[in-house]
Image (spheres, rainbow, N blue to C red):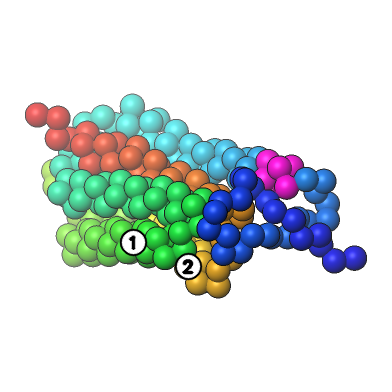
Amino acid sequence: MADTVVPVGHPPAEDTEAEVTHLRHHFATPEQQMDASMLGMWTFLITEVLFFGGMFAGYAVYRAMYPGAFESTSEYMDVVLGGTNTAVLICSSLTMVLAVRAAQLSRRNELIRYLLLTMVFGSVFLVIKGFEYHSKWVEHLVPGFNFQYKPEYYAHNAQILFFLYFCMTGMHALHMIVGLGLLTYLVIQAYRRVFNANYFSPVEMIGLYWHFVDVVWIFLFPLLYLIGHRK
């Protein structure tokens, strides 16, 4: 039996480019489907908190064990590039919020524009991060056999911070790449006129994911870049 076609989400707006969407057969009402989507997304984000929480816990333990080494190695982090990336992600969160609002109001062109702007900000972040990684490689600060660090008495413990740096920022960058893929999907769907005031839950769900990734960076920036720049 085919899925029943009924409005989902919020009350219809005056601009009814596409008034209806599919209510899946295992849901009784559109509201139940929306609530289930929200519950599923928040459950997923909780697992992401646990995932990154393990790395933050490892950081806390090793920083408590080797505070001098961590402050010394932080001075090798480029605060300007890190701060620029922070500003870029804050801007991307703003454009993502505006994209969700545009979807709620059935403003298709605005939705596409804000999604593309969010993708631009995300891409700029990854390009800057790529330059950072390249500079660490050139300076022999990638943990491994070719690792070189001054002062030498911090060299062994310094590898721990740089390992955490590449691990934490690398996983964050991977989540950014996934986010860009999801935004690409939203743009394609928006071009197909899928979203409207009655159906915008995918935009809202992916927006939550994007904001989570941004918040992770807000914690990473001071922990990795600023601990040796307090003066």
| Residue 126, horizontal then vertical, whole percent | 32, 61
Pointer 1: what residue? Answer: 117
Q: Identify the secondary structure beneath mark 1.
A: helix
- Asked if the magenta segment contains residue 34, the reply would be yes
- Callout 2: SS: helix
The stretch drawn in magenta includes residue 33: yes
Nearest to the observer: residue 111 or residue 60: 111
Question: Which residue type carries mark 1?
Answer: Leu
Residue 14 location (% of width, % of height): 54, 54
Can see residue 190? Answer: yes
In the rendered view, would you say 231 is above or below 15? above
Q: Is residue 107 left or right of residue 114?
A: right
- Please name the amino acid that badge 2 sits on: Val
Query: Which residue carries the number 2 mark?
Result: 187
**Foreground pick, 73 / 145:** 73
Residue at x-position 51% and y-position 67%: 190
Q: Overall secondary structure of the magenta stretch?
A: helix
Residue 189 seen in this snapshot: no
The magenta segment:
30-36
Relative depth, front residue between 95 and 41: 95
Taking the spot 29% from the left edge, 31% from the top edge, the residue there is: 66
